[in-house]
Amino acid sequence: MQALQIFLQNWIYLIGAMAIFGIGLYITLTNENIFKIIVGLDIIESGTNLFMTAIAWHPKAVMPIYTATNQLVVNGKVVSADPLPQSLVLTAIVIGLGTTALALTIAVKIFEKYGTLDVRKIKEAKR
Amino acid sequence: MRNDTPALVKRITALSLITILLIGFFLAFKEMPKGSAVNVNQRVSRLYVMKNVETATKMMENGKFFAKGIKPLRTDVPYTPITFGKSKNLEDGAANVVTSIVVDYRGFDTLGEVTVLFLAATGVAMLLFGKEKKRKNKTEPSLIMYVGTRISFAIIFLFGIYIFVHGHLTPGGGFPGGAVIASGILGLFLGKNGYKPNHLGLKVFESLSGMAFVIIGLTGLFSVHSFLANFLPTGVIGDLYSAGFIGLIYIAIGMKVGAELSAVVNSMIVDVEEEWS
Amino acid sequence: MNIFNNAALLIGVPLLFAFSIPLFGLISKELAKWVTLLTIGFNASFSFYILFAHKYPTMVVMGNWLPPFGENLYIGPVAAFLVFVISMIGLLIAIYNLWAIKKGDVIRFSVLFLMFTAGASGIVLTGDIFNLFIFMEITGISSYALAAFGPERRALGGAFKFLVVSSIGSTLYLMGVTLIYTQLGTLNIAEIAARINQTTPGLLTFAGILIISGLAVEAELFPFNGWVPDTYTGAINGVSASLSGIAAISAVYALFRIAMTVFGKSGGAYVSTYGKIDLMALIALLATATVIIGELSALSQKNVKKMLAYSSMAQMGLIAVGFSIGNKLGVYGGIFQLVNHSIAKSMLFLIVGVLVAVGVGENIDDFKGLWKRNPFLTLTFSIGAFSMLGFPLFGGFWSKFSIVAASVQRGGWYDFIIGLVLFASVVEAFYYLRIVAYMFASDVELPKVKTPITPAIPIFILAVSIVAIGIFPQIVGTFSAQAAGELTHKMSGYILHVIPSIAAH
């Protein structure tokens, strides 16, 4: 029971993040459809974000917001979750959003000009 | 990868690459403090949570912050207790520590982040640039949809404003608030075929709110001699009128993100014709 | 610690004007282009002032929080010089764009080009490892959009490839940064660099590999450079010029700032890194492979733009070889070659752009007999080609010479590497001289073409600067020697200027 609890506390989020990352990378590398590649990129993005929030968390963490009842600092020690990776994730999410929007736009244009989203057919079409 | 590679070879290569990466990650994770071993007190975020960066800076200048062999002494920085609703004039007045990092301690990152969003919206609009084309047979939404989106738009808009105004007190802030506002505008698009927002107004709004952020930063440069420095009093922690310039910046970001995402939605929904050649 | 906070204007002013260009664009399209030009001009003159009149190394503190607690910009010899080069090349390409960009959404193109240049200077200036990621994304997103801009549909495929590879790369970079953060608890480059030996070697090595592979995408190193030929060929010529002239500088800077300052060991004649494997040796191997593959692929190309793209890849490999030698002479040669490469390669792309626009075309056969049709462009193209080859009296000679000298000095397995690189240079000489021979020797009778005045200005300035650097190498040499001093001595060159109270190890 103890071992399971330690495993859950220490590893579960990291394993989940890495699983998502691996799935996304596999989709991106093997698919020939541009839309699926974009989906893969988004899944990679989610994996990274989960990984970054996972390193901020510890089992006794409270939320990093001062309220009337929430004590962030006990006896001079910080007990809250680490706020810095959380703020980095906020940034990373917005950047991922921008990349996805741009990728989808390029995909729309590609479909307009080539009439297909298949990478192989685009390669065969001349200029 | 080349396009004429057989699918099987592609898959095996991808799988082995991912396996190597995952094994590497596993080995790195074994050495990494994780779960119950995470100690915020050894990280720089301790200073942000305690709002004690100025003390740490003084300790650093006296040569007391880094011990021999450069172990940082972050746990030694003296702690001044912070009480919600009572502590006054802290170095950063935001109750939400994530907000104080995003806007104040690492505000330059956020300026860059807003720029990334702006560039993405600009790129989307640039690539989809052209004359408007007539829409092809799309079903007209029902009256209920039309009225419902219009009524809920006002509420959604108000909620978005609430979120970014309270960014320094509650979870949320400029980015979620802006996204909420943009979702309201998306509702308007769904409610009526051929709905067009005021393009000129959107463009001016987008530019002015972005410029407001940079101008707040430049005000810091000219009044406190540091770009993006806080030049307003920080007040009592937990008050609505507290936290110095965080409120101002979050209003600018909220408007910027709202206008930006609406512009993205607009350029993606409205069909255009090519204007090249 | 020498603080000069007004240098934040190098980032602040371009941002302010980038946000306001849509408003200027309401008045006139031409005004938008001129605002871009003048803003980059401001950056160029301000960095000129810092380089020649202000005391550096100096530092910019953001938000009044001193490093390592807040963010900072660090303007050392490397940054001051490279920002100047980036802004100057950006300025010249902006002049070219006044003439070249007439159709499509000119206003938004100007915004993206301005932020592309500003983001590249931000990469060079920043002193925070996460902020570096933000600026990479600013440069990245604007360059995806710029690369997809244009009437031709081949631009889209290249831009999409670039987007996919580059976003995977930046994800890997972010993961590496996060791994380091878990053990050191800081994001400031100087503090990480000073405390890097407090991490465990396994994690350090893996994080290093992740970060290097993330940065190698933009630095065009093998095997992360599959996007290069398609993107460079597809994009309009002004964009290809800025990708090879501006983005390349910032990418190489970021790569070696991380590899040498953050991971490097202080002391020792040659920089090597902490961890289980030597990252500098890894980069050297990748760079050699890049040189060989790039030159051999360039040889068989019929399209000049594609040839220039492969050659650009190979040149980046050569630059990385120079840096990875790790002593002062090697880094000196690397920076010198970086400057030469960005001047010559952006000039060549601009010339191809003019030639396509006046109706000559971009295939090698179209270049036949160009001397009789347009002497000015032929001469400048030949100057660029000779500088690429490293002919004496052209800029490239001095840098290639010092890279070779440095690797002979180092000896060991670098003898092998430099042998391969020299072999690749022979290949390079073959295909550049083939074009030059086509241009001068062919006696095809075709009508003459006129050179437009506006794009001739930047081409002329770039050509003159190549010859000037060739005759007086100390123009670049003094600055790149200072820069080499900063990069090879991490404690005294970087860390102690940012955090003076940190103890030496």
Image (tube, helix red, strand yellow):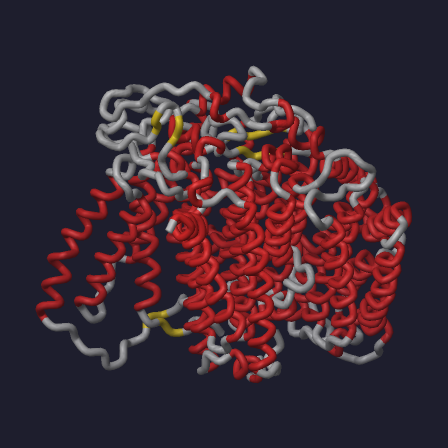
- Near-viewer residue (B17 or C480): B17
Image location (x, y in percent) of residue C147: 54, 64
Please give the name of the residue rendered at 57% of the width and 81% of the height, measured from the top-left corner.
B8
Residue C327 can be seen in this image: yes
- How many dots with numbers? 0
Image location (x, y in percent) of residue A107: 44, 71
Q: Is C31 placed left or right of C438 in the picture?
A: left
- Near-viewer residue (C245 or B108): B108
Q: Residue furthest front?
A: A1
Please give the name of the residue rendered at 22% of the width and 28% of the height, measured from the top-left corner.
B239
Image location (x, y in percent) of residue C2: 61, 23
Quadrant of the image for the N terminus of chain C? top right
Please give the name of the residue rendered at 47% of the width and 27% of the height, measured from the top-left corner.
C65
Residue C376 can be seen in this image: no
On screen, residue B20 above or below A63: below
On screen, residue A117 above or below C175: below
On screen, residue B175 above or below A44: above
Quadrant of the image for the C terminus of chain C? top right
Please give the name of the residue rendered at 17% of the width and 47% of the height, measured from the top-left corner.
B158
Q: Residue furthest top?
A: B62
The image quarter containing residue B70 is top right
On screen, residue B196 above or below B31: below
Image location (x, y in percent) of residue C370: 77, 71
Q: Is C336 placed left or right of C143 in the picture?
A: right
- Near-viewer residue (C452 or B203): B203
